[in-house]
Image (spheres, grey):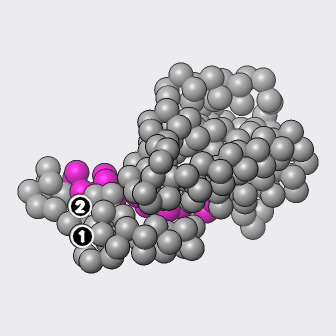
Amino acid sequence: QFIAGSITAWWIYVKLGSAWHYIYFPLNIDIYVGWLIIPIVILIVMFTANAVNIADGMDGLAGGMLISSFSALMLLSWINGFGEIAILNATVVGALATYTYFNIKPARFMMGDVGSLGLGALFAVNTIAIGEIGSIFFLGFLFYIEAITVLIQVLGRYIFNKKIFKMAPIHHHFELNGWTEEKTIMRFWVIN
């Protein structure tokens, strides 16, 4: 993960020029970060890969959420003039639709770490490559919520010696509160 993030960060900082030393947010907010783009990109690639991996805890959850995230990314790629990346993202959406069909409960295929980490890293790198680094948190915010709940749970256990959630990540918290697996997954898909 660190190597993938480092290669992406190096390419952006060295090869793509000074226009890529900014983080562009929606509503025309531009923040110049200069060389800090390197650790920012590494962190985003690693955190996103792990966030998708954490969300892959119920049958169909990660696949369904990735479909909507990559669909939005496909449209942004097309609108921003990155046709090749839009085609790549459309291919990923098609593959995820087929995968998710067979991953819905009872799952006949599993994504595993290779799939979830790879798709999370691809999602981050594609978002960065089209200059939408500031939009990544909107495109995949439930993945980040899943990962942040794990961090909160770990910090709560070590600092306060108590659990904040019944179980982390948060999709298991809802399940322990009486939601069925199907209800949890469908709510996450709709919210995403």
Q: Nearer the viewer, residue 154 or 34?
A: 154
Height in image: 6 above or below 153? above
Q: Nearer the viewer, mark 2 or mark 1?
A: 1
Q: Which mark is residue 167?
A: 2
Query: Distance between the Cα atoms at labels 2 and 1?
Result: 8 Å
Seen at 33% across and 57% down, the residue is 169
Seen at 48% across and 74% down, the residue is 187
Q: Nearer the viewer, residue 58 or 7?
A: 58
Where residue 165 appears, as percent x and y from the top left, is: 23, 66
Q: Amino acid at mark 1?
A: Leu
Q: Is 102 situated left or right of 72 in this image?
A: left
Q: Is 131 situated left or right of 168 in this image?
A: right
Q: Which residue is under mark 1?
A: 176
Mark 1, Cα crowd under 10 Å, few <14 / some 14-19 / many 20+, is some
Q: Which mark is residue 122?
A: none
Height in image: 68 above or below 77? below
Residue 129 is covered by the magenta coloring = no
Local secondary structure at mark 2:
loop
Where residue 80 appears, as percent x and y from the top left, is: 86, 52
* Residue stretch in magenta: 138-155
Q: Is 30 situated left or right of 155 in this image?
A: right
Seen at 31% across and 52% down, the residue is 151
Where residue 7 appears, as percent x and y from the top left, is: 63, 23
